């Protein structure tokens, strides 16, 4: 797909972020057609360039999060680097950064300075604990966000240790929050002519995502505990062991439970006072799970899931990643994995973001803002965006020759 078809075509973004939360936001904007320029430190670049897994000496972690971006390196501690960034800011619509709070101000590149150069600029920043508050200057990584925000306390099995989610969920939530916030601010800037700062904290993003978990404490005064795969609001809504592994069943209301009981050929369960309605099922989840797993004991996952779905009961196998990647609906129909070409790593598949829109507004053109010149000391001139259509040249170490 050509870049100009993206819904954010013409939007100019400076991406000063690194590792995951910020680059994830920049990736979302680039996938939707924005012209995103990744700005990295000379000589080292983004820390995630050294992350696993590697292909031909290049990090697939980095490539996946920085696809569809152009790139340069600037030394923001030098006068020349600062001047170049200020010139780019004059042309930009959005700037995103994830330095520790106060760092950009110390560099003389904080929001007030940049807003004075370009009043329409939307300035997005994501950090561990936010730009203000008594903990604002503490460092923040994904596991810090998950721990401080409460997510780890409710993840895992009863009696077990608090557990980090299998992916960097605090970072992903932070990146999603930042993208939503800056796009809202961008729309406002188009109306008012005034940009604003969008302040996102990893911890806030986790706290906001806990929804029902927070409400249990706020309403009932009970501290939620780890409950495995059970859900606090409805039952049965859990994982269940079958002959060849585990599957999930999600009965979100009494009607679905009646359908499940029918599929199990145990209609009497709907009349059992322990399971008569959702509140009773929540109080007797252990007994109900034992009954369901007894029924599943000699059954295969895929056949059972197909039978339950046919009966109208929401169910799914617990897919391993190889099954996900090879699932025809996910990989083919929804195209969640797309081919990209990188000048060093070669051909690889990248994750496609979940955003879908008519007219196919999401695009994937290149593997990342990273070319063979990076790290080899090659001195180049990167041609950057200019509102009038004229080429604006900024001296730097080019990271890609995509355009």
Image: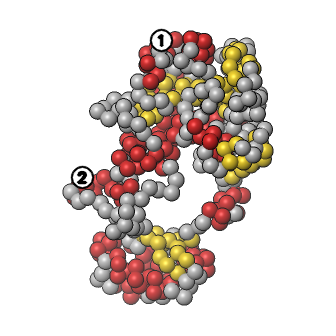
Identified at 47% across, 15% down, the residue is 108
Task: Answer with left or right where residue 351 lies relative to residue 286.
Answer: right
111 to the left or right of 32: left
The residue where tag 1 is placed is: 116
Q: What secondary structure is marked by label 1?
A: helix
Question: Could you say whether the residue bearing mark 2 is in a helix, strand or loop?
Answer: helix
- Residue found at x 21% / y 57%: 221
- Please provide percent x and percent y for residue 159: 33, 69
| Residue lying at 66% horizontally and 44% vertically, measured from the top left | 59
Query: Where is residue 175 drawn, in percent x and y?
Result: 51, 40
* Residue at horizontal 72 percent and vertical 41 percent from the top: 367
Q: Of marks 2 and 1, which one's residue comes earlier in the chain?
A: 1
**Above/below status of 53 relative to 365:** below
Which residue bears the numbered disc 2?
218
Asked if residue 11 can be seen in this view, the reply is: no
Q: Is residue 343 left or right of residue 27?
A: right
Is 39 placed above or below 129 here?
above
Q: Quadrant of the C terminus?
A: top right
């Amino acid at each position: 797909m050509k870049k100009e078809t993206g819904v954010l075509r013409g939007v100019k973004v400076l991406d000063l972020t690194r590792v995951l939360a910020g680059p994830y936001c920049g990736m979302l904007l680039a996938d939707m057609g924005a012209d995103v320029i990744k700005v990295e430190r000379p000589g080292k670049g983004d820390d995630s360039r050294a992350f696993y897994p590697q292909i031909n000496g290049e990090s697939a972690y980095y490539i996946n999060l920085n696809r569809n971006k152009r790139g340069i390196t600037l030394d923001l501690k030098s006068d020349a680097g600062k001047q170049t960034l200020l010139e780019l800011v004059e042309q930009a619509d959005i700037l995103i950064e994830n330095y520790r709070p106060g760092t950009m101000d110390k560099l003389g590149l904080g929001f007030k300075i940049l807003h004075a150069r370009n009043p329409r600029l939307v300035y997005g920043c994501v950090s561990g604990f936010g730009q203000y508050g008594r903990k604002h200057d503490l460092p923040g990584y994904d596991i810090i966000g998950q721990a401080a925000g409460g997510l780890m306390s409710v993840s895992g099995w009863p009696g077990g240790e608090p557990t980090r989610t299998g992916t960097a969920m605090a970072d992903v939530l932070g990146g999603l929050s930042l993208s939503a916030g800056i796009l809202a601010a961008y729309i406002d800037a188009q109306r008012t002519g005034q940009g604003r700062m969008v302040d996102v904290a990893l911890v806030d993003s986790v706290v906001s995502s806990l929804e029902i978990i927070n409400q249990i404490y706020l309403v009932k005064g009970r501290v939620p505990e780890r409950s495995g795969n059970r859900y606090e609001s409805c039952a049965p809504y859990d994982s269940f062991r079958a002959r060849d592994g585990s599957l999930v069943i999600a009965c979100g209301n009494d009607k679905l439970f009646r359908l499940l009981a029918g599929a199990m050929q145990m209609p009497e369960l709907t009349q059992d006072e322990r399971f008569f309605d959702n509140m009773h099922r929540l109080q007797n989840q252990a007994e109900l799970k034992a009954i369901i797993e007894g029924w599943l004991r000699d059954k295969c996952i895929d056949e059972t899931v197909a039978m339950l779905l046919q009966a109208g009961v929401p169910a799914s196998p617990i897919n391993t990643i190889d099954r996900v990647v090879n699932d025809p609906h996910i990989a083919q129909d929804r195209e969640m994995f797309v081919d990209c070409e990188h000048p060093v790593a070669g051909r690889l598949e990248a994750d496609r973001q979940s955003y879908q829109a008519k007219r196919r507004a999401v695009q994937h053109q290149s593997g990342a803002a990273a070319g063979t010149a990076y790290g080899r000391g090659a001195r180049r001139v990167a041609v950057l965006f200019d509102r009038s259509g004229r080429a604006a040249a900024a001296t730097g170490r080019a990271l890609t020759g995509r355009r």
